[in-house]
Structure formats: structure tokens, C-alpha cells
Image: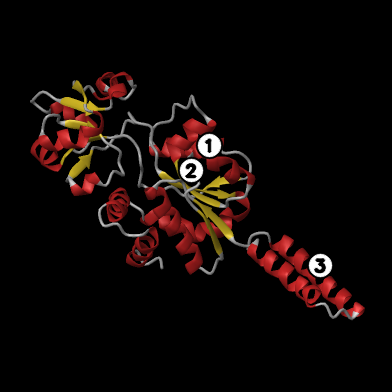
Amino acid sequence: MKHSTRTALAAAFASVAVLALAGCGSSDPLEEDTPAAEESGSAASDAIVVGSQAYYSNEIIAEIYAQALEGAGYEVERSFNIGQRDAYLPSLESGEIDLFPEYSGSLLQQAYDPETEARTPDDVYAALVDALPEGLTALEQSTASDQDSYTVTAAFAEENDLEEIGDLADVDTPLTLGGPAELEERPYGPDGVKDVYGVDVAFSATGDTTVEELVAGTIQVGNVFTADPRIETEDLVPLDDPEGLFLAANVVPIASTDVADEIAEVIDPVSAALTPEGLVSLNVQSTEDQRSPEDIAADWLAENDLA
């Protein structure tokens, strides 16, 4: 397991200390307990440290990783709710944290390659693998993501036979896209969807009420994050984006290279089982059902035969 050399050395030093104390015939109980304390400290260093952002969805995924590793016999230390990327990335890069659930495109663009032109999940993942600094390894990514999308109601999708963003070009009625005010100028806003997919949309700055207006029918398309629990609770459908209008942000475990190969056999099956709909459902259990990450993770692992 991780740090086995360091553990062996520590154990050796502890043995020497025991012999030295025995030779001195010390009767001080504090001195007699010292080797055991050192040995305990060494054992703790073998733990796989799993981190998470201060974000409920990310903590649920991190808890799934942690319980999966514990189920495989690993000792795990949790370092959750650290904050955002600028707070935890130094600890991940330094090796203080061994495993962290990340989002491929946002990590790539914000931390390592601001000018990246990769957009699709496979291209972004490949670019991230190349861009990660020495000491970090990307394990297999999930199909689940937490990124911008063009989303419609399930009823509107069925009525107009919509699966991909490009299908919107065949809708006969006028379309209005809703989202934050800045979306109008973003490369994936009205001009972007016209350039990439040939879709004409008007724009409405709906801000925090995007989902409500989408459900009400005052807009037909909404800029909604793909892991938003309201996708399930309000019966919404994020449209597929095969041309990569949006920067893909798939859930990807980032691991310390010194443990990556060892834990991949536990974590990769987790990524394979985590679907877009599954991640939304996990988030619903947190926001709507008010369940703890521990309970959500335990049930998900059992349901997917990963416990």
C-alpha cells in the first residue's frame, strides 16, 4: 500500500527504540509507550486521503470513493469541504491529498490550460491527462458531468423529437433561450449555437429563474447545469452536445501517481457506474430528501454491486 517504504523504516526505528529502552531498564511508563505511539503514527500515514470541495454533490462523490476504498480494505482519511480549487489544488499537487473528484474541463481550463480548444469529453480528457503536473494521474472519467447545457422540458423534447442541440433547428416555432445575463455574450450563447448548430434563438436574461420559466413555458430552452437536481424533480432533458459547444466537465478522479495504479481497480468501476442521470439522482437525495452523504454513498454502492 502507499508509503510502504516509509512505514517499514518507521517500524525498524521503532524496533531499535524498543531494544534501547529494554537495555536501559527504564521503568518510566511514558518512555515504554513511546515506540507504540510511533508505530501508530506510521500506520496512520498509510491512509488514502480523499478530499472534496465545499459542494454537496462533490462531497457525495468523494464519500463514494472513500467507502469503496474502505470496502476494498484500505484505510481512508477524509478531508472534505476544503473549499474551491484554489484552496485544495496545492494540497492535491503536493501529495497531502491522494484522491479528489474533479471535473475535466473546468480543471483543465482553470488550472492548466486556459487557452484549450478541447471541448468534447474524450478530447478534454486526453488534454487533461497531458496537462496534469508530475505526481498527478487522471483515473477513468465518468459519463456523469456537471457543466453548462441546453435543457428543455421532457414534454417539449417529446413533442419536437429532440435529442441533440442541433435538433432545435427543426423546431417550427420561435425559440427563446434563457440563462444568466452574461450568457448572451458567451461563446456558447445565441451566436455560438447559431454558428455550431445552425439554431436561431432569441435571448432572455432569466438568471436564477431559468428553470421556473422553462417549466412555465416562457422560454423553450434553458442554460442549466447537467447535475442540477431539478432536472429530475422538474422532468427536464439536457440535450446532447456532440459538436462540443460547451466545454465538457465530466467527473474524473484525480489521484496521486504513487497510489493511482493501486486504487484504480477500485475507483474505475465507480466511474463506470456513475451516469449523468445517476448523479442527478444522488443530488436529489441530498437537496430534496435531506439524506447524509454517508447514507447516499452506501446505498449507491450497494445498488451498483460495488459495496
Disc 3 crowd, CA 10 A, few/some/many (<14, 14-19, 20+):
some
- Most foreground residue, 224 or 289: 289
Q: Position of residue 149 (x, y in %)?
A: 28, 35
Name the kind of residue labelled 3 in the image: Phe
Say which element carries label 3.
Answer: helix
Work out whether 26 lies above or below 103: below
Residue visible at 27% across and 52% down in the picture: 284
Q: Which mark is residue 86?
A: 1
Q: Position of residue 209 (x, y in %)?
A: 21, 33
Q: Is residue 160 left or right of residue 147?
A: left
- Most foreground residue, 200 or 76: 76
Q: Position of residue 266 (x, y in %)?
A: 48, 61
Q: Does the residue at mark 1 contact the one at mark 2 (Cβ under 8 Å)?
A: yes
Q: Earlier in the sequence, mark 3 or mark 2?
A: 3
Q: Is residue 142 left or right of residue 12?
A: left
Name the kind of residue labelled 1 in the image: Asp
Disc 2 crowd, CA 10 A, few/some/many (<14, 14-19, 20+):
few
Within the image, what quadrant is residue 173 found in? top left
Q: Position of residue 84 (x, y in %)?
A: 48, 40
Colour scheme: secondary structure
Provide the residue designation for mark 2.
83
Disc 1 crowd, CA 10 A, few/some/many (<14, 14-19, 20+):
few
Residue visible at 20% across and 26% down in the picture: 177
Q: Which mark is residue 13?
A: 3
The answer, for residue 227, to whether it is visible in the render is: yes
Q: Is residue 118 left or right of residue 30?
A: left
Of labels 3 and 2, the one closer to you: 2
